[in-house]
Image (cartoon, rainbow, N blue to C red):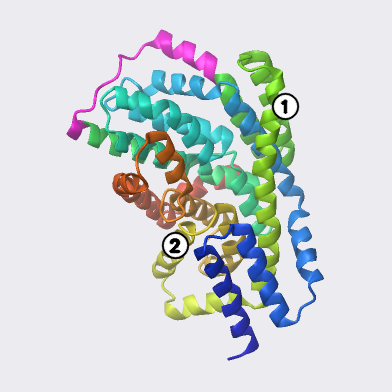
Amino acid sequence: MSTQVIATIILLGSFFLLIFLGNHIIFSIGVSTLITVIYLGIPLQTVAQQTVKGLNSFSLMAVPFFILAGEIMSAGGITRRLVKLANALVGWMRCGLGMVNILASMFFGGISGSPTADVSSIGAMMIPMMEENGYDTEFSAGVTMASSVQGLLIPPSHNMVIFAMAAGGVSVGQLFMGGFVPGIFLGVALMIYCYIVARKRNYPVGDKFSLKKTGKAVVEGIWGLGTVLIVVIGVVAGVFTATESAAIACVYALFITFVVYREIPFREIINILKKSLKTLSMVMGLIGVSSAFGWVISYLQIPSKLTTLLLGISTNKVVLLLLINLLLLIMGTMMDMICSILIITPIILPVVTAIGMSPVQLGVIMILNLGIGLITPPVGVLLYVCSAISKRSIEQLTKAMLPFYCVMLAVLLAITFIPSISMALPNLIYG
C-alpha cells in the first residue's frame, strides 16, 4: 500500500477507535491528527498553525455573540412567554398542547439556535403539562425532541455560520433564508402527524380561540421574537454583517431581559456569561482541532478520492444524493454536529458541486441530517437530556421516536429532491 493509503487508514481508524473507546471528541480528533502527521513526517508546528488558522475567521466572531444572546434570552423568561404565545395561536386545535410544543420550539429555536437549550427549557415546561392533560409521556418527549431540530434550520443559527466558513465563504444571509422555509416545513409536517395521532388516541382539544388572549400573548412575546427579526432582516437587507447583527442581538437581549421583562436580577449576568463561556470554549476547541484534521484530509486528497469513488459507483444524481444523505445520517449519529460540519463539508462539497447542487441547499440538507443525528443513538445528546426530563429510559424514548424519524426523513427527502423548498427564498431575495 502507498504512504497516502496507510496514512488515511491511520487517520480515520485511530479517530473512530478513540470515539468507540469513549474519549472526548476534541481529544479524538487531536490525537488522530497528531499520529498521522508524525507518520507522514510533517513538522508538528503545522498542526498548531492550522489550528490557529481555523479560528482566525471574521465570520466566526458571530458565534460567541449568538451563543450569548441565546443564553440571555433563555434565562430571562422568554420561554414561558413563547409557550403562552404558541398556546394562544394553536392551543385550541386537536392535540393542542402538542401543537403548542412544536410552535414554541419554532419560536425559541429561532432565538437560541440550540436544540439542547430548546429541549431543556421547552421540555421541562411542556412534558409535565402534556402528561397532566392525558398525553403519553413518550409521545410528549418525542414531540419535544423532534420539534427542537427546527431551531437548527430557522435563522439565526450559529451552525449555519460554521457551515458557511467550512464551505469556503458561502453567504450567511443566503443560508439563513435557505433554512427558513425548510424549518417551517418540518414544523408543519410534525403538526400533521400529531393531529393524526391525536385523533387515533383521542387526545384532548384545547380551549377555544380567543382574540383578546391572542393579542395579549403577542404583545408579551413579540419582544423576544424581535431578536430573530433584528438578525434576519439586518443581514438579508445588507444593513450589517452576521457578526454585527449577532452583537446587536446581544445588546437587544440584555435590554429585553433586564429592562423590559426584569424577571432576574442583573447579577445573574455572571452565571449567564459562565454558561456561554463554557459552551463557547467547547465550540472553539472543536473548530480549532477540526481545522487541523481537515487540513490533513485535504493533504491526503480524500475529498477528490471520495468524489471519484462516488461518481464511480453511479453518475445518477438520485443515487448520489441518497448516498450522501446516508453518509450524513450515519456521521450525525456518531459525532458532534459542529465537528461533523467542519470535517464532512470539504469532503462532500466537490461531489454535490459536480452534480449541480447549490452549497446553500447542501447546507440545509446537512444541518437537518445532523439534527436527526442529535436524537438518534448512540450519541443522541438530546435523548439523554430528554430522558432526564421525562424520567424515561433511552430505549423507551428511541422506540417512541420511530414514527417521528419517518416524518423527518420524509421532510429530508423532500428538501433533497425539491431544491425550491430551500432555494426559492434565497433566489427571490438575492437573485
Say which amino acid is labelled 1.
Val
The image shows residue 314 at horizontal and vertical percentages of: 42, 77
Position of residue 252 relative to residue 215, above or below, is below
Position of residue 62 relative to residue 260, above or below, is below
With 404 as the anchor, is 332 left or right in this view? right
Position of residue 419 relative to residue 39, above or below, is above
Q: Any magenta on residue 389?
A: no
Residue located 60% across and 15% down the image: 263
Label whose residue precedes the other's in the sequence (1 or 2): 1
Residue located 31% across and 34% down the image: 137
Mark on residue 364?
none
Looking at the rendering, the stretch of residues picked out in magenta corresponds to 199-221
Q: What is the secondary structure assignment of the residue under circle 2? A: helix
Q: What is the secondary structure assignment of the residue under circle 1? A: helix
Of residues 88 and 39, the one drawn nearer to the viewer in this rendering:
39
For marks 1 and 2, give the one nearer the viewer: 2
Residue at image mark 1: 251
Q: Any magenta on residue 218?
A: yes
Q: Picture quarter containing residue 244?
A: top right
With 356 as the anchor, is 298 left or right in this view? right
Of residues 221 and 288, the one drawn nearer to the viewer in this rendering:
288
Residue 270 visible? The answer is yes
The image shows residue 346 at horizontal and vertical percentages of: 61, 65
Residue at image mark 2: 330
Residue 431 visible? The answer is no
Position of residue 104 relative to residue 346, above or below, is above
For the stretch drawn in magenta, the main secondary structure is: helix
